[in-house]
Amino acid sequence: PAAETTPAAPEPAQTNAAADSGSAGGSNLVGPGTKSRPPLAFTFDMAPPTDSKDHFIEWMVKNRGEDPKFLAERWDRYEAMMGVGDLLNDQTRRAFLLTPREEFVRKISLSHSYEHNFLDIGYGVTISGPHAVGRMTSTLDIKKGDKVLEIGTGSGYQSALLGHLTDKVWTIEIIKPLADRTRSVYDGLISRGYSEYTNVHTKQADGYYGWE
């Protein structure tokens, strides 16, 4: 008689975690894939113009080398946040305008980068909406030299914005593949000339006891 064979088990469906566990911590699945290289190094007194959308985009393209499409979306969200009082001080307004949110969302969500919404970043986690980030950060009224500890790095967008406000930012993420991915995003941005992200110190750990 023919030997009995056991059918092969079906391949498991790929989860968000598996999908994001590729090379460089999955950072290849995050951001627009453009390689903007800021010609002008960041300083804490850097301030893009806010008198008009055209002037803002022109200045950012010239000095930060970023995509006009995303810059236009960033400006539109900035105006919406200003209209409802979610950017309460000058330093947070400046930080919002300088932070490329599109670098911290997954590629499948790029077209939604500046929407008033929370976006899935895998691992059961979201990137907070720009209005929530703006209001929370404004309320803290952070200034250069202030020490900030963030529990839950997530996408890295919140701590990226903080890196434009102070040179003393520490952030902890408990989910290892997410922590690795976000660290690789920061390292990639730093290598391209975004020196402000050297202000952000990351750690993969349970943040229950703070930074140990």
Image (spheres, rainbow, N blue to C red):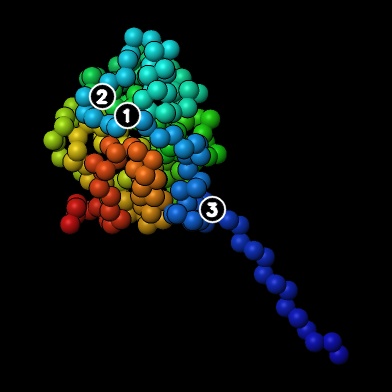
Please, is residue 26 above or below residue 150 in the view?
Answer: below
Q: Position of residue 111 (x, y in %)?
A: 53, 30
Res. 73 visible in picture: no
Q: Position of residue 178 (x, y in %)?
A: 40, 51
Q: Nearer the viewer, mark 1 or mark 3?
A: 1
* Residue kind at label 3, given as amino acid type: Ala
Look at 76% across and 81% down and name the residue there: 5
Question: Which disc number belongs to residue 19?
Answer: 3
Q: Relative to 210, is 50 on the left or the right?
A: right
- Farthest front residue in view: 39
Q: Camera-side residue: 10 or 134?
A: 134
Sequence order check, earlier mark of 2 and 3: 3
Question: Which disc number belongs to residue 120?
Answer: none
Please, is residue 25 above or below residue 101 in the view?
Answer: below
Sequence order check, earlier mark of 2 and 1: 1
Res. 29 visible in picture: yes
Q: Are marks 2 and 1 in contact (CB under 8 Å)?
A: yes
Sequence order check, earlier mark of 1 and 3: 3
Label 2, secondary structure: give it: loop
Label 1, secondary structure: give it: loop
Question: Which disc number belongs to residue 46?
Answer: 2
Q: Which residue is mark 1?
A: 40
Res. 160 image quadrant: top left
Look at 84% across and 87% down and name the residue there: 2
Q: Relative to 111, is 136 on the left or the right?
A: left
Image quarter hosting the C terminus: bottom left
Q: Position of residue 176 (x, y in %)?
A: 37, 57
Res. 153 image quadrant: top left
* Residue kind at label 1, given as amino acid type: Leu
Q: CA distance from mark 1 to mark 3?
A: 35 Å
